[in-house]
Structure formats: C-alpha cells, structure tokens
Image (cartoon, rainbow, N blue to C red):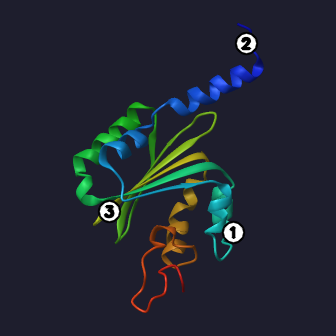
Amino acid sequence: MKITLAHVFLLMSICGYAQNSAVTEFQETHGTALSLYFYPSTLRMINLERNVEFDALIRDVRKARFFRMDSGMVGKNDLQELTETLSREGFEEIMFIKNKDMDVRVWGIEKRVPETIIIAKAEHEVMLLEVNGMINVAKIPKIMDAFNENAFLDVLNLNEKKPNGQRTNNK
C-alpha cells in the first residue's frame, strides 16, 4: 500500500482527536447541564463591548469546550481526582482565584499547541473550560470582572428569561 502525504495528515489528525482528555472523561462520567463549543469566530461574537483585552486573550485560541454541571453531580473528591489526573498527564496548576462567587483553578500544559483547563466551582455548579491554543492567563481575573459587568453576551443563560420577559443577556 502506498502511503501518501494526505494519508499521513489524516492519520495524524485522527490520532490527535482520538485521545480522550481528562476533561472529556470527566464530562462523560458526570454528565453536563450545558455543553458549548467555541471557535475563534464565536468567541469574538460574545465580546459585545469589543473588550481589547479579551480579543488579545483569545487571539491564539484554536477552539474551546465548555461544560457546566450541577454541583450535585460532582463531589469534592471528584474534582480532586480530576486535578490528580491532570497532574499525571503533565498539566501544572498555574493560577488559583478565589472570589465571593466561585473558586477558579487554571491548569496548563506546554505542547506544540498549548492547552489550558479552567475549573470553576461555585455554590451550585461546576464549570470546566478546555482551551486548545495559547492564552495569557494573567488576563483571566480582569476578564472575569468584565463578564460580571455584562460586557459579554451571556451564552450560558440564553434560554432563561427575566421576570419582564427579556432575555438575561439583554442590558
């Protein structure tokens, strides 16, 4: 059988996507209340106020996967097991952010295409964000504040309505 360059690229892409990540396994085991997939174009669309720092943060992102789970689905030991798995896979904890609403842990691994895993635990939910591509993690706290100030489209609550009938992402 003659192997062409196209076959090699096909095999490389299949091998690259066939690997189950720790986040994928965690999500499949615990289920999700919400799953979202983002690419550079969709990430730029949620930036309603054209936040320059957010644009810089996502500039080198290839794709991102977001999972939200009810806290009843995920125990403290489950999160500990996830972080231990990430550590075994070569990820390092880069940052820990504690604020009044949630605890956020940022994990990263240096590879040809860097990966970042963000684990956010709030009172009633756990959120996982898996980013494929380079991000400047130092900008994450400031971006979190901008999200809290409604400078971005609230893609997590598009179907929820406010009492007066308006969507939650409207100002």
Query: Residue at 52% of width from left, 30% of height from top?
Result: 18
Residue 70 pos. (x, y %): 30, 60
Residue type highlighted by circle 1: Val
Query: Residue at 64% of width from left, 33% of height from top?
Result: 112
Instruction: Tell me the quadrant of the picture where the N terminus can be found.
Output: top right
Residue at mark 2 to residue at mark 1: CA–CA distance:
46 Å
Residue 102 pos. (x, y %): 35, 65
Q: Quadrant of residue 89?
A: top left
Answer with left or right where residue 80 lies relative to residue 47: left
Residue placed most toward the observer, 125 or 102: 125
Q: Secondary structure at mark 1?
A: helix
Instruction: Give yes or no for contact between labels 3 and 1 (Cβ–Cβ under 8 Å).
Output: no
Residue at mark 2 to residue at mark 3: CA–CA distance:
48 Å
Query: Which residue is denoted by mark 1 in the rendering?
Result: 52
Eye-nearest disc, 2 or 1: 2
Q: Secondary structure at mark 2?
A: loop
Residue 146 pos. (x, y %): 54, 73
Query: Which residue is denoted by mark 3 in the rendering?
Result: 125
Whichever of labels 2 and 1 marks the residue nearer the N terminus, that label is 2
Query: Which residue is denoted by mark 2 in the rendering?
Result: 3
Q: Residues within 10 Å of mark 3 (few under 14, many from 20)?
A: some
Looking at the image, is 97 positioned above or below residue 62?
below
Residue type highlighted by circle 2: Ile
Residue type highlighted by circle 3: Glu
Residue at mark 3 to residue at mark 1: CA–CA distance:
29 Å
Residue 2 pos. (x, y %): 74, 9
Q: Residue lying farthest right? A: 5
Whichever of labels 2 and 3 marks the residue nearer the N terminus, that label is 2
Query: Residue at 36% of width from left, 54% of height from top?
Result: 32
